[in-house]
Amino acid sequence: RSAIVPVAGLGTRLLPATKSQPKEMLPVARKPVVQYVAEELVANGIEQILFVTGRGKTSIENHFDHDPELARLLAAANKHELLEHLSAVELNAKFFYTRQRLQRGLGDAVLCGEHFAGEEPFVVALGDSIIGLNASSQAVSRMAELFQERHASCVLAIEEVPPEETVHYGIIEPADAEGDVFRVANLVEKPAPGRAPSNLAIAGRYVFSPLIFDMIRRVQPDSRGEIQLTEAIQLMCEEGRRVLALKLPPGEKRYDIGNFGSYFATFVEFALVESEL
Ligand code: G1P
């Protein structure tokens, strides 16, 4: 039912575009990135979303809020199609917001959602990644099913990346595989070239048991003072908990908005499906 969407990162790889606006609000064709993420989650049965925000991120809250003045103006001008687009933004889910006060890494951001998640399993969806063209992905639903059927403690979405790119991602060491489902033996965060145990990268979607919060608390900050979520999942592996990974199907690839190369490519791909433009 619940998803935590971390959106507190500074977006330094996208400066100057992100100097005074969150990277999650950058447009990809018609919509800001974060709207695709919320739409994907709602289409996968999520009922409540917690955004873990930070300073300079209030435009995300404004985006999902109702704007009565704009709605009145559009109605008076008979712009009903635009009004429909606006109400689509408000979506059929409950939205919650909290702030990560210090930049202490992804693990710490997820820990900000502990009270929100309560005793139930939950989804983590990174706010700078869209899954599938126009967010048309059912991967999160499949991950939640796997989590239940296989009594897992964690299910990760993964994708293959070229060997030279493993340094940008959390990389899994698979123990065994059954089709597109892998059992994870170990994980390494951003391994240097030649040190990666595979080319299977964590792709920005996770399903967790609330047990993850205890694991995050046990993780020591890295050299940059950040608490890595990947380290907390590694602790689950070390304890013999069941950590599974689902490879994203070819038609539901991940679009990473976190750097200019893949942001540009994503924008072009999403814009080109609008044939009339
Ligand atoms: C984070 C995670 C990493 C994951 C990546 C996916 O890294 O730490 O394990 O593979 O997201 O985008 P970041 O992009 O925040 O550096």
Image: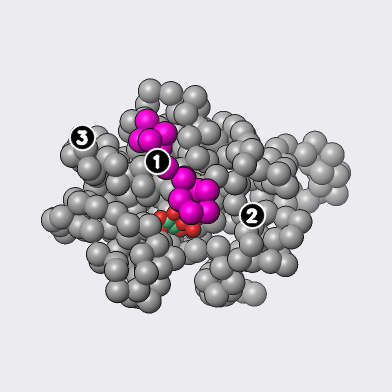
Marks 3, 1: nearer the viewer: 1
The answer to whether mark 3 and mark 2 are in CB contact below 8 A is: no
Question: Measured from the top left, where is residue 36 in percent x and y?
Answer: 55, 53
Residue at which label 2 appears? 10
Residue at which label 1 appears? 219
Q: Give the amino acid type for the residue marked by disc 1 in the picture.
A: Val
Classify residue 214 as left or right of residue 59.
left
What is the CA distance from the residue labelled 3 to the residue labelled 2?
Answer: 36 Å
Q: Secondary structure at mark 2?
A: loop
Q: Secondary structure at mark 3?
A: loop
Which numbered dot is residue 151?
3
> Based on the displayed image, in which of its 4 quarters is residue 248 positioned?
bottom left
Marks 1, 2: nearer the viewer: 1
What is the CA distance from the residue labelled 3 to the residue labelled 1?
Answer: 24 Å
Q: Give the amino acid type for the residue marked by disc 2 in the picture.
A: Leu
100 w.r.t. 214: above or below: below
Q: Secondary structure at mark 1?
A: loop
Q: Give the amino acid type for the residue marked by disc 3 in the picture.
A: His
Q: What span is in magenta?
A: 214-227
Classify residue 38 as left or right of residue 201.
right
Q: Residue at x 42, y 42 (%)?
A: 220
Q: Residue at x 59, y 51 (%)?
A: 9
Quarter of the image containing the N terminus? top left
